[in-house]
Amino acid sequence: MNDVLNMIWASLPMPALIVDQDDCLQEINSAAELFLNTSRKTLFKTKIFDQLAIDAPLDAVLKTARKDGAPIFINNVDVSSGLSAPIECNIQVSSIQDHHGWLLILFETRQIADRLEKYNKIKRSARSAIGMAEMLAHEIKNPLAGIKGAAQLLAMGLSPEDQELTTLIVDESKRIVSLLDQVEQFGNLRPPKLKPTNIHDLINRAQKSASISYAAHMKFNCIFDPSLPLCMVDGGQIIQVLQNLIKNASEAAHVYGGTIKIKTYYDGSLRIRRKDRSEHSLPLQVQISDDGPGLPSDLSENIFEPFVSGKENGTGLGLALVSKIISEHDGAISVNSVPGKTVFQISLPIETT
């Protein structure tokens, strides 16, 4: 390949391989080296079947592509190099002109698509939460005040023994009102006032606050990318998000391990589409992870929906509010959880000049 083609080949963002008529690897781009966790020198002229484990009849696919000369697409198959866990991919196989029997194989990993699907689901949940909050506040809070007042009036003419029941009614009414106050935050949360902000300043403030209160028993491991650009956020609201996630991590992990890891890095691969169909990038990444037991498998897909909680006495409102705040910032949030590691990932827009 000439210099221009070499430059294009090296710049391809997806793993790409070229095999000859004997299924031996002749070209491997940089993305494929990372994907396979092996150098080009090691892979060169080795059989592709010795390097990849694919949950599909790849040998038959290659034969068909050579015979018909038309591109072949295989969707949603697990691919592994044997050195790492399988990754779900879409695969495209195409013949190469002027090289009889040679094939180009492209791998599109599903990780970004899955994150976008989760993001859209979380955003829909946040919108539902707003309408639900307004309905609950109007339909429940007002009559509840009447129940509480009636119980207090009844208590005036009762014996001390009977007053225990009216006290219970009053206390439970107060507890429900407190719960509804939290729900109302969905409808009352003001639009974010965006301005260029150093995300590490916000993380440090949230961590320091947590370290002297609910996360005093935890160990923090912070890995920051100092070269990150400024992000466009409402600092107060993002601190609220960070404190909520750190609090959840401290409650989940302290019995089992006790370490909270906070990591920042840049990743320009995630782009989302706004309502006006314009696209924008979310390159600034913040990960907050813990070494707790992980989320229950039946909750992990719905953890950002209101009233879904893995805690015994949890309200299920904290993460729903977090998802609403991130959604209002045109950002994205997702979670991946296995026993021993739960990772919440926030993706935010950066300042543009």
Image (cartoon, grey):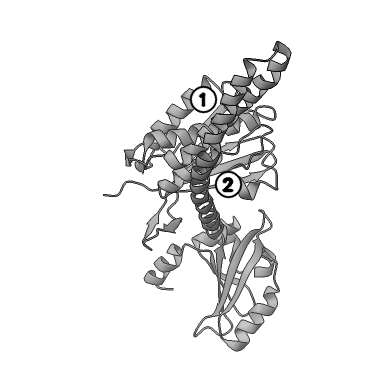
SS category of the residue bearing label 2: loop
Image location of residue 249, percent across then percent down: 59, 33
Give the CA distance from mark 2 to mark 1: 25 Å
Q: Is residue 229 above or below residue 36?
A: above
Which residue carries the number 1 mark? 210
N-terminal of the two: label 2 or label 1? Answer: 1
List the single residue furthest toward the front. 157
Residue at position x 40%, y 54% in the image? 281
Query: How many neighbours does mark 1 have within 10 angstroms: few (below 14), some (14-19), or many (20 or more)?
Result: many
In depth, the one of 177 and 299 nearer the eye is 177
Q: Which mark is residue 201?
A: none
Query: How many neighbours does mark 2 have within 10 angstroms: few (below 14), some (14-19), or many (20 or more)?
Result: many
Tell me the quadrant of the picture where the N terminus can be found: bottom left
Label tally: 2
Image location of residue 6, percent across then percent down: 42, 68
Which residue carries the number 2 mark? 305
Residue at position x 66%, y 63% in the image? 78
List the single residue furthest toward the left. 353
Q: Is residue 335 above or below residue 175?
A: below
Image location of residue 70, percent across then percent down: 56, 84
In depth, the one of 127 and 49 nearer the eye is 127
- Amino acid tagged 2: Glu
- Amino acid tagged 1: Ala
Image location of residue 161, percent across then percent down: 73, 13
